[in-house]
Image: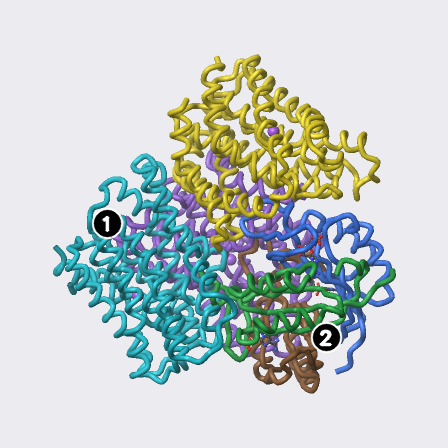
Chain colours: A yellow, B blue, C purple, D brown, E green, F cyan
């Protein structure tokens, strides 16, 4: 496991992330232009969705799919209640901000998903293609949970529009649509499609991921510089401990379902990850009184680096031991 | 060239809210608007920049709409019902136009 | 032919287009940023131009080039008169709008060209590299024809500047310059250049095309949602029948010239396609009274999907039967 | 700091027309202008957005030019000769500048 | 809706100078600003365009800041100390805001 | 050598540059969007930095590194004094503008570095990976030199901020950070990283370089059209002769150090190149009274095309003769 950790630390992906972080903290003017960052994210989600679908076309779906989907949805929905309770007890965050942060930690980070599959591919560990669908299913339930929490715990007036509109928007948000769409296309076109798109979607993947992680490092670094003041010890501890709690819960469920080592690692990583595309946007509409910088600083500034550098190798090592 | 006085409303608002604002403007019978990208900003919530962002949550846009003075209050009421709890800035200024029937 | 149609329907390219269409109609916020869309278009035109040139460097040019160029120019110039007549008889479009739409259908769609070559490559059907030059030559004559029609049929004052300036701008518009420029470079550098650029321009092509068609689907879907009201039954029928008429004329000419099956398919597709880069911009300057949404909704919202999903496999199948 | 009154003309116009407008401004001896991108808009012709567009036909840009009041009419005449049949909006407002000799 | 008069300062300036300007604004206790991208421009130094540029040297940005009239002179002094020898344009105009305490 | 020159002239890279130049001069509306141009530059610097680092990981560093670094710094610092003297004697540029131009010619052009490595790779000539570090080290000294010159020769008031801030900004400017960062990552991850990133960073490199040079041609062409009036015969002559002087100095130093033919060619090209990313931005802050169009027209409009078309094949040929 130490070797794995070291190998991970010295992987180009982690190093490009660290480069971005360092550049931002040194106030370098290095930037990835906004539209380029969006292209990189689009590409990675398309690639991972398609790859998952093609894998499903190849190996078929077995009974574990339904169980895993259920486990994912459960994790996404239950985690925010746990996270909220922890935040209220251990930190000084008010109910609204605590609910918003809890939503981020219940939901998943597509970028962390991309990173874990990158490491698994590098290590030659297979994972079930349908985990892509599980990831998509885990995005929204946490938002529902957070809205329930916020309604109970706060006396705030209703947000500017109906819950239904909001949930519809989240369910059809761009990153889910491309992930699920590419998954379905991969499943429909199978080997023929996979061969055709291999040079673009598979061979170039690690390189694009490096460039993307450079950008994530830059954004995280700038976010940390800006959001420092939100990082009280208690809140920072939450951002490191909460992923581990989510990981433990996911590990237990994965063993119960009997997932393969690769898929176990993916499920653990999803549960340990915190959203920063879909949920932040939803929270701006659903809980506008929450300060967006709090959740973003935690999610991208602390939890993502933690997962990328420490978490992922740890989750893979654990998955290797506990999984069938 | 003869010109006619109108009001120019400039709204800097979080990107996720844009759809709701334009829907509200349409309800208020505003005839048109223009959305301009924003690169970066600074305010009570600190600094932000669009650079490298993959989501829209921490992004802002600027919406400009030219309206008749007679409709200004209705438009501002509609807009403020939405933005009052969001992050953003609304300003109003005087402008002159050549084809007044359009606004 | 049914197999071909089915195979086409299940190709990643068509499916990504459909994904974009569906996402737009579901009002998802999925978008391809503007500058990224322009990069994708630039890449595809560069790739197809270069590939055509390299093919010419390899196989040389035979006598059919001149005949095919002449046929293309004729098709581009003649079609608008036919299209205008049909539009005036079957629809309620006024002369100016009918002339503008006619220009779109006389000219060609570089994106449809890219799509047909994508399918041909996938099927392993060769086409003559010089068809790229034919495509470029077919872009402008239709605009000249439309201006002649508009001058005769409308009493509108002259547009804001001279015809000469306008035609010069069209002839040097970005998409023609990159297509023809890359063609010449491919022809000049031959096999050596082709080997060097293969990973970027050839291997990645199908993947980039998928991403691009996703974008085209999004834009077409949004255009349809916006432009619905222009789609009267008569006008919609035109957008499906006109490509078939153009295709039939091109098929006849291709047989007369004795083109290969692949090149016949390309010529038919070009004739059946309707512009939406060069001509729309030219019409805004030449016939500003025309409502741009009418032609764009037809060209991108109806004719392009029709060609991509139904037309191209049909044209390839027909070409396979009739060509030498 | 002493300031001097000038006029600010803001033109939202279709991208393909931009070259002709700037050429006209140059003919009218306007000393400078600035072009700002536009993301999206709504008007009598409906909604449009720059997103995903590969051509310029359905794109708009915003041009801002600061001119001396004495030249306002000449500039507006020149601009309207071009934009009157195109899609777009022109507004004029009062601004103050510090270095008046520049405009 | 009751509105209150403020000043809108619009600065078009070379991109490499932006950091120094915002630092100066912060020193002058300006509460916020918004930066808008610029595509192209024309002035005494000729034409320029952002297209295809890989560096920032020949690029410009537009900064908009709403300030209280009482602070206008201090802000303009601070800004002009920086931009007077650089390439750029500064204009001031009147605007109205709804929440005056913010500026 | 004639063959080399001809082969260079007919390389896709040079031809795409010429295409961009021609399109700009023909006033075509072909453009590479700004953020795309920045992506291409980011990619190329990342690729070349990483490749250099991976090469160092493979072959190690020998004693020549220190000597070459010293030579590079010396060239960068000394050249501006020479350039300034020449400009003041042969042209009518005032002291401030002459100092600004001198800074550009002392420093290096990362883009020219990318181009020369592209040609070397095509020719199969190896170069030492650490030349990437040498390039980075050569960026800043010229700016220091120019500031010394400007302080001595002009009575201008101090610029808007301290020298220290400025030099820090230059040292951490984006292009240096990505070049050096990718170099270190390449060196740290060695063969494993190189294998993983090969399809993206190595195989696609020539193609991306072509697209990038198309953009450079467009920008150079537009700059020439705009900046024509600055191109007096004396100033234009400087932009052609100065690279040759820099090249000669570098050649002498390379021989003295005993560099390999490939590295000699790189050092010569660096010395012969003129900056247009880092230095122009620094000059806007340090010497705002200088007219930026003068230096940029010379550097990108004259010297870069000269180096790309004539210089690089010449430098490689010379290096092949004189190097150990
Ligand atoms: N005084 C101001 N002038 C111009 N823009 C402002 C001003 N205050 C705030 N903004 C913009 O509104 C955003 C949010 O402001 P705030 O809610 O104060 O953080 C800022 O990031 C700026 O883009
Ligand atoms: N009242 C308005 N305020 C601001 N922008 C407008 C307004 N009306 C139109 N526009 C802009 O001008 C474009 C064309 O307007 P129209 O010709 O009315 O469709 C719109 O898409 C907007 O970008
Ligand atoms: N009169 C003006 N109106 C609007 N923008 C201007 C004006 N003059 C200059 N600018 C902007 O400021 C930049 C630099 O101006 P200059 O220093 O005159 O070359 C121009 O490229 C424009 O973007
Ligand atoms: Na989670
Ligand atoms: Na056609
Ligand atoms: Na040099």
Host chain of mark 2: D
Q: Nearer the viewer, mark 1 or mark 2?
A: 1
- Secondary structure beneath dot 2 equals strand
> Is A67 situated above or below C294?
above
- At 20% from the left and 68% from the top, the residue drawn is F248
In the image: residue B94, left or right of residue F92: right
Task: Let me know if residue F192 appears in the view.
Answer: yes
> Is A105 situated above or below B6?
above
Q: Residue A177: horizontal and vertical position, in percent? A: 60, 38
Q: Residue B97: horizontal and vertical position, in percent? A: 76, 74
Q: Residue C26: horizontal and vertical position, in percent? A: 67, 41
According to the picture, the residue beneath numbered tag 1 turns out to be F128
- Secondary structure beneath dot 1 equals loop
Q: Choose between E96 and C148: the one closer to the eye.
A: E96
Q: Crowding near pointer 2: few (<14 within 10 Å), some, many (20+)?
A: many
Which quadrant holds residue D35?
bottom right
Q: Choose between A183 and C254: the one closer to the eye.
A: A183
Q: CA distance from mark 1 to mark 2?
A: 61 Å
Q: Quadrant of ligand 3?
A: bottom right
Q: Choose between A126 and E1: the one closer to the eye.
A: E1
**Discs 1 and 2 share one subunit:** no
According to the picture, the residue beneath numbered tag 2 turns out to be D92
Q: Label 2 CB, ligand 3: below 8 Å?
A: no
- At 16% from the left and 65% from the top, the residue drawn is F2
Q: Crowding near pointer 1: few (<14 within 10 Å), some, many (20+)?
A: many
Q: Choose between A145 and E91: the one closer to the eye.
A: E91
Task: Let me know if residue C171 appears in the view.
Answer: no
Q: Residue F53: horizontal and vertical position, in percent? A: 31, 45
Mark identifier at residue C306: none
In the image: residue A315, left or right of residue C153: left
């Amino acid at each position: 496991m130490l070797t794995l950790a070291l190998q991970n630390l010295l992987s180009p992906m982690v190093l490009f992330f660290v480069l971005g972080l360092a550049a931002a903290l040194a106030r370098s003017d290095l930037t990835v232009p906004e539209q380029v960052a969006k292209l990189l994210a689009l590409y990675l989600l398309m690639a991972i969705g398609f790859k998952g679908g093609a894998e499903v076309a190849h190996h078929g779906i077995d009974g574990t799919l339904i169980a895993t989907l259920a486990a994912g949805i459960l994790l996404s929905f239950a985690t925010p209640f746990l996270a909220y309770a922890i935040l209220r007890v251990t930190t000084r965050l008010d109910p609204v901000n605590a609910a918003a942060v809890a939503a981020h930690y219940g939901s998943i980070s597509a970028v962390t998903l991309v990173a874990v599959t990158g490491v698994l591919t590098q290590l030659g560990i297979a994972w079930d293609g349908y985990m892509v669908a599980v990831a998509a299913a885990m995005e929204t339930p946490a938002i529902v949970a957070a809205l329930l929490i916020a309604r109970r715990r706060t006396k705030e007036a209703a947000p500017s529009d109906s819950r239904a509109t909001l949930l519809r928007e989240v369910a059809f948000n761009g990153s889910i649509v491309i992930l699920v769409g590419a998954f379905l296309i991969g499943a429909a076109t199978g080997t023929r499609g996979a061969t055709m798109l291999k040079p673009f979607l598979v061979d170039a993947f690690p390189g694009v991921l490096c460039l993307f992680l450079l950008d994530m490092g830059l954004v995280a670094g700038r976010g940390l510089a800006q959001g420092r003041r939100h990082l009280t010890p208690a809140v920072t501890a939450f951002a490191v401990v909460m992923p581990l709690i989510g990981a433990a819960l996911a590990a237990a469920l994965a063993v119960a379902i009997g997932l393969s080592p690769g898929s176990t690692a993916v499920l653990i990583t999803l549960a340990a990850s915190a959203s920063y595309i879909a949920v932040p946007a939803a929270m701006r509409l659903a809980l506008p009184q929450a300060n967006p910088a709090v959740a973003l600083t935690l999610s991208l500034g602390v939890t993502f680096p933690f997962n990328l550098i420490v978490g992922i190798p740890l989750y893979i090592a654990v998955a290797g031991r506990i999984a069938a | 060239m003869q010109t006619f006085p109108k009001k120019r409303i400039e709204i800097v608002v979080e990107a996720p809210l844009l759809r709701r604002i334009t829907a509200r403007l349409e309800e208020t019978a505003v005839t048109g608007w223009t959305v301009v990208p924003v690169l970066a900003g600074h305010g009570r919530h600190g600094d932000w920049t669009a650079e490298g962002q993959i989501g829209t949550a921490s992004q802002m846009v600027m919406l400009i709409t030219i309206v008749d003075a007679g409709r200004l209050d209705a438009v501002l009421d509609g807009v403020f019902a939405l933005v009052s709890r969001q992050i953003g800035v609304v300003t109003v200024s005087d402008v002159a136009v050549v084809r007044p029937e359009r606004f």
